[in-house]
Amino acid sequence: MQAFFFDQDGILYDSMPKHARAWAQVMQAHGYDFSEEDCFMNEGRTGKDVIREAIWELEHREATEDEIWDIYEEKGRAFVAQGEVGPIEGVIDVLRFLKKNKKDIWVVTGSAQASLLDNLNTKIGPFFDRTRMVTAFDVTHGKPDPEPYLKAWDKSKQPKKDCCVIENAPLGVRSAKAAGLHTIAVNTGPLADIALWNEGADQVFASMSDLLSWLKENI
Ligand code: MG
């Protein structure tokens, strides 16, 4: 394997609990029925898609671009207000190992959160290159559509068999498997492993240190 496609939230950043609180707080303030658990179930989708769907379900109408961005910005502020986020435990060792072994490190995320995207190299470590990122700004259809991972694969110029996705979310696994890529799930959140297996994950690890052990034996 040569190219490793990392999801961002819940894989690089330990950010999901704060995202979940921010989403629930802002959506409920707007009258939408959206819990923290809904956030974990929707993880991977772009914020835009989450808001569009919530408005459709409650009001049976298409959301306007303006209201989508207003709510998304509000959610972004509610997220930032909860303080700094750090890396997922053990992920820096994984990244360091891959870098040492001259592997390509990619970020493939539905996020448009500038406070996270723009600070990967300062908050996680010097592993990232803006030309090796696919974000919410780069795709028409976010996860669970295969487009984000297909785009990263296409840009990587590697055969699919040499690519590997690292995901924590069921819909992220669905996206990666629909793109035809080997997908390792690391279950860093509150959902049961079965939610990841059910989407077709090739492997499910409980922690980054388990993933690192596997990489050391297999790379
Ligand atoms: Mg994630």
Image (cartoon, helix red, strand yellow):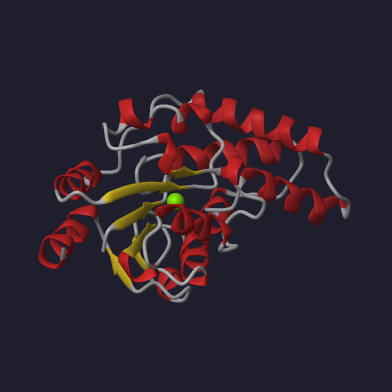
Residue 210 pos. (x, y %): 18, 60
Tell me the quadrant of the picture where the C terminus can be found: bottom left
Q: Identify the residue shown where x is 58% and y is 59%.
A: 147
Of the pair 191 and 110, the residue shown nearer to us: 110
Q: Is residue 127 left or right of residue 199?
A: left
Q: How many marks?
A: 0
Task: Please tell me which residue lies in front, 30 or 206.
Answer: 206
Instruction: Say whether residue 125 is left or right of residue 158.
Output: left
Measured from the top left, where is residue 118 in percent x and y?
Answer: 45, 28
Q: Residue at x 29, y 49 (%)?
A: 104
Residue 11, percent across and down?
36, 49
Q: Residue at x 26, y 32 (%)?
A: 125
Q: If the image is split into quadrants, where does the N terminus sit?
A: bottom left
Q: Is residue 183 above or below residue 140?
A: below
For the residue pair 163 and 10, the one nearer the viewer reads as: 163
Q: Residue pushed farthest front? A: 157
**Quadrant assignment, res 136:** top right
Q: Is residue 51 left or right of residue 23?
A: right
Say if 37 sits above or below 26 in the image. below
